[in-house]
Image (cartoon, rainbow, N blue to C red):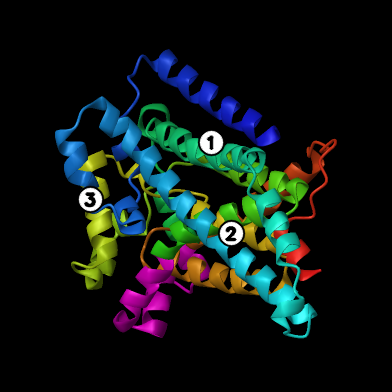
Amino acid sequence: MPQEWLVLLFGFFAVAVYSLLGRPLPDLYAALNLPLPHLSGVSDSAAAVSTGGAAIKFGLPFLLLFTLSIENYAFILLIFILFSALKVVHERRWRISDVSWSAFGLAVLQRISLGQLLQDFRFLSATVIMFAEFAILKNLIPHVSGGSWDQWLIESDRFLCGGKMCSEILLSWFGTGALESVSGHYLFFFRYLSLVATFFVVAVPRKITQECLCALIAAYLFGVLWVYGMPSTGPVFVHSELYAFMADGQIAGLQRGLLESQGQVYLISGLPSLHVAVVVIGSIFLWKVSRLLAGASWAFTLLTINSTVYLGWHYVLDDVAAVMLAFGVVWLSRACSWKWVGYRDSGLFLRALS
């Protein structure tokens, strides 16, 4: 599968760079630095990492990411089963006695057969492993790239926003009272990525799924290479006084934790914003499946752009570059898409609607 070849390329590149620099691979839990306990419900993961050995530090991030994927997998499959059951009953004019439940049961069992589950797991595994490889590569940025593009990006922000940082403009519009809701939009990104990736794996035709996951993996690969060429830290780490209003909120705690555990702010932000790139990619591919879901995704794109700038993670040009990257990798994934041979699948979602 193309996405698996991309993941292998990603991994070989990371290992080769570390070998050339003579550096040990980083602690994977610290390298990922995602709010995984918040997402997965595992509240004592940080304590487990501090007291555990290498197996915990390298294995726990995969466990938490896979847990999130399996949660969404079960949720989406359950929604499909319930929706399909209602559709079957409705087609019989709500006369349950006329419904062929045996045929419905066979259709569901066909979807959740061992072969289908294994194939879905391969798709999800590629996405999870990609995250680890991306984190490992990003840890090298301070050792490979010198200097910083922050001052140039600050000037571009001021040029585009009339002499002020663009986050100052957003703060004047929404005020400090919007901090909690904006933080929620930002943190929901991790759930969004997992939900969208799992939705495509479970319910969308394989060709579209393949293209979408290839675009996501390519975005992270090309995105981290872009950061290598133009490293930056982000507004909150250059003009921290502008973001004092965040005080001890969840985002401020995450930012402090990242600085304390990583010691290098290159690992936190940069051009382009992969938050924005991922949501744009998801919106583009959802448009091929459902206009309603795509509309909701495009709305979330606007919220994500707002949150990355409002919270000081990114400059406006980071988000502009992210949109360019997203459309570029979508075009590339379609141009390089391999043809699926001998596999007929209309996807659960389209099948349920037909």
As drawn, the label of residue 225 is: 1
* Labels 3, 1: front one: 3
Where is residue 42 drawn, in percent x and y?
28, 52
Q: Is residue 102 above or below residue 173?
A: above
Residue 283 within the segment the image draws in magenta: no
- Please indicate, yes or no, whether residue 18 appears anywhere in the rendered image: yes
For label 2, the crowd category at 10 Å Cα-Cα, with few meaning under 14, some 14 to 19 and many 20 or more, is some
> Label 1, label 2: how many angstroms apart (C-alpha)?
36 Å
> Label 3, label 2: how many angstroms apart (C-alpha)?
36 Å
Amino acid on which the number 1 mark rests in the picture: Leu
For label 3, the crowd category at 10 Å Cα-Cα, with few meaning under 14, some 14 to 19 and many 20 or more, is some
Residue 142 falls in image quadrant: top left
Residue 178 within the segment the image draws in magenta: yes
Where is residue 314 drawn, in percent x and y?
43, 58
* Residues shaded magenta: 157-186
Secondary structure of the residue carrying numbered label 1: helix
Which residue sits at x=43%, y=64%? Answer: 188
Badges 3 and 2: C-beta atoms under 8 Å apart? no
> With 118 as the anchor, is 271 left or right in this view?
left
> With 2 as the anchor, is 245 left or right in this view?
left
Badges 3 and 1: C-beta atoms under 8 Å apart? no
Where is residue 5 drawn, in percent x and y?
65, 28
Residue wearing tag 2:
77
